[in-house]
Amino acid sequence: MTTKLNRKAIWGWYFFDWAAQPYHTLLVTFIFGPYFVSTVVGDPVQGQILWGRMMAVVGIFLAVIAPIMGAIADSAGPRKPWVALFSVFYIVCSATLWMAVPGMNDVTLILIIFGVGFASVELAQVLVNAILPLLGPQKELGRISGSGWAFGYVGGFVALLIALLLLTENGDGVTLLQIPPILGLDPATYEGTRSVGILTSIWYALAVIPFFLFVPDVKRNHSLGTAIARGLGDLKTTLAGLPNNTSLFAYLGSSMFYRDALNGLYTFGGIYAAGVLGWETTQIGIFGIVAIISGAIFSWLGGFADKKYGPKKVITFCVFALIIVCTLIIGTSRESFFGAVLSDSSTFPDTLFMFCGAVIGAAGGVLQAASRTMLVHQAEPERVTEAFGLYALSGRATAFLAPALIALVTDLTQNQRLGLTPVILLFGIGLALLFWVRSAEEYR
């Protein structure tokens, strides 16, 4: 690990988060996902089931590929060429989502395109996370990680604001500025909403340039063939030895469940708002703005909390907060709050869900930033990419669980709100496993 700060490299590394965040903000959570469920499929319940199954398949793929790729990258050396490869898939798949027209007879191709793009950004993130130890001394990594996540949230906020003001139309065919989508896009066929994929693609292609220009990389160690053989061998050894490292083993298990639950919230939050509360895309976008602003502020503050209290305490607090928020969401519908009947004109569900969005943004951002710091404290420096591959494995080995369980419970109950109940269970398991994880201070 490096012992001094490289500020130009740090800012270049921040820009990957800035570049990649709109895929999650615009496509997964706030605009394309809800649009796909409510308009492309046309049936919120069936759309949630299809979306859940797609995300489950992607999760299984990542669980297998991410640790293998991380091990090979550690043995081969440079990480940035791999990031460039996955960036190509990211850019092409984002732009191709333009084909998702309302009421499509067969949505399979759209689901495949979205899944490939999502897998690409996740695999690139594994490699980018592994570069974190090159940016400064270990005591500063929590602050760097938190600031990077905050900077990414700001990027997502700006991209979402552009989409809402200029592109995404509501039921009346106008944007948040009360104008038709720009560039002559046809609101009748939702061209404004569909164009967010193109916006995401262009945004990433431009914003990721500082990462490639300024971020350091490690030197090539072996040829690709040798790296594959050595990497797979090292991965086998690491996996065999994991049970002997109780803290790392428990942490990977803990993060496996709580990050899966968090991804479930991100994936289905906007879909929930569209189906249960009847929100239009512009309303969901405003909800997104609130969540992103909250996430940016608290991710930055969380970096300082991480430095002062250590990542374990920060992670524990955030998981507690998210369990409470999930309970509130599941207990609230347009008609009632935990069984108490609400009037037809009540705005309480909207206000509560907006508050929950702010907490999800804050706790989720801090949780993810602190989680990658925690792994750096526990990983072997020479196998850090492999460790982040295992971290991705721990986040993806059961990544199919949240979407699959949400899809299953939604299908069984035919109720979107009850479909989110598995998220609480996953958060609870993750919280329980933290008991066996050593705090960062014990590694110093």
Image (cartoon, rainbow, N blue to C red):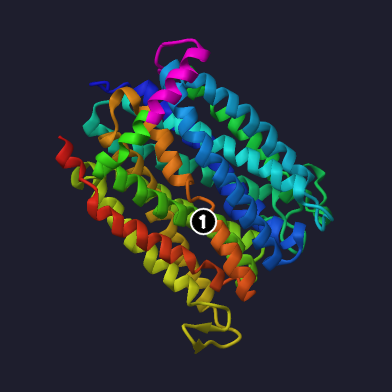
Image point 53% across, 25% down: which residue?
83
Q: Quadrant of the N terminus?
A: top left
Image point 49% across, 35% down: which residue?
66
Looking at the picture, tell me which residue is in the foreground, 132 or 181: 132
| Vertical arrangement, residue 62 with respect to residue 192, above or below | above
Instruction: Indicate left or right for 335 with 395 as reference.
Output: right
Looking at the picture, tell me which residue is in the foreground, 111 or 411: 411
Q: Quadrant of the C terminus?
A: top left
| Vertical arrangement, residue 232 with respect to residue 38, above or below | above
Residue hosting label 1: 401
Q: Is residue 52 visible?
A: yes
Residue numbers of the magenta segment: 215-236
Image point 45% across, 16% down: which residue?
76
In percent of width and height, residue 230 lies at 43, 19
In percent of width and height, residue 342 lies at 53, 87
Image point 55% across, 29% down: which residue?
207
In percent of width and height, residue 94 lies at 67, 38
